[in-house]
Image (cartoon, rainbow, N blue to C red):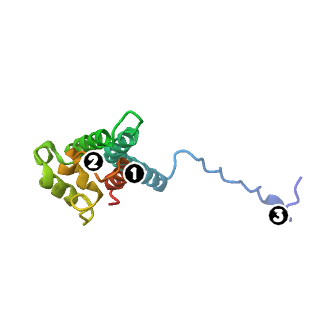
Amino acid sequence: MQDPSDPLARLRDIHVPVEPSLWPPAPGWWLVAGILSISLWYGFRILDRYREKRLPVRLFINRLKAISLGPDRQPEEVLYEMSSLVRQFSIQRHGRERVAALQGQDWLDFLDSTTRGSNRFSEGVGRVLGTRLYQPAPDTSPEELRAFLIGWARGKN
């Protein structure tokens, strides 16, 4: 029996509260998860648009690198092939109505307008893409033009 004079003997034991469960999460965590999922969706969408926009540039550069000056090819043939590739790329990028009819100096002026403030097409290495393309001995090497066009496609020229 318990001693009635002992007040501590009448106390009951401590009851520990139930540990909170992890599910369902608090409303704040739902808000964080929603914001995070929307941010991830938006980020992937921006990345996909960027990659889609850069795909023609990568294809142009790969096709440009595939054009080679072999022992059986003349530099004029290679330059002509590069010129047609530049025209295809420009039509794809700026539209057929704006690009397809351009020739000679108008074509070079248009290409100059797509560069960063330089006249590298009409006065520099790219002038071979105008009327100089049809001369018997062009003064530009295919390797020099290829390097310039790769920089141009990437937006560095």
Q: Are the residues at dot 2 and dot 1 in contact (C-beta closer than 8 Å)?
A: no
| Image quadrant where one finds the C terminus | bottom left
**Which residue carries the number 1 mark?**
43
Q: Amino acid at mark 1?
A: Gly
Disc number lying in front (3 or 2): 2
Position of residue 127 relative to residue 63, above or below, is below
- Circle nearer the N terminus (2, 1): 1
- How far across and down, in percent of the image, does residue 130 sit? 19, 51
- Circle nearer the N terminus (3, 2): 3
What residue is rendered at 37% in x and 53% in y? 144
What residue is rendered at 85% in x and 61% in y? 4
**Which residue carries the number 2 mark?**
137
| Cα gap from disc 2 to disc 1, whole angstroms | 51 Å
**Which residue carries the number 3 mark?**
8
Q: Is residue 24 left or right of residue 142?
A: right
What residue is rendered at 50% in x and 53% in y? 26
Q: Residue 35 is drawn in which quadrant?
A: bottom left
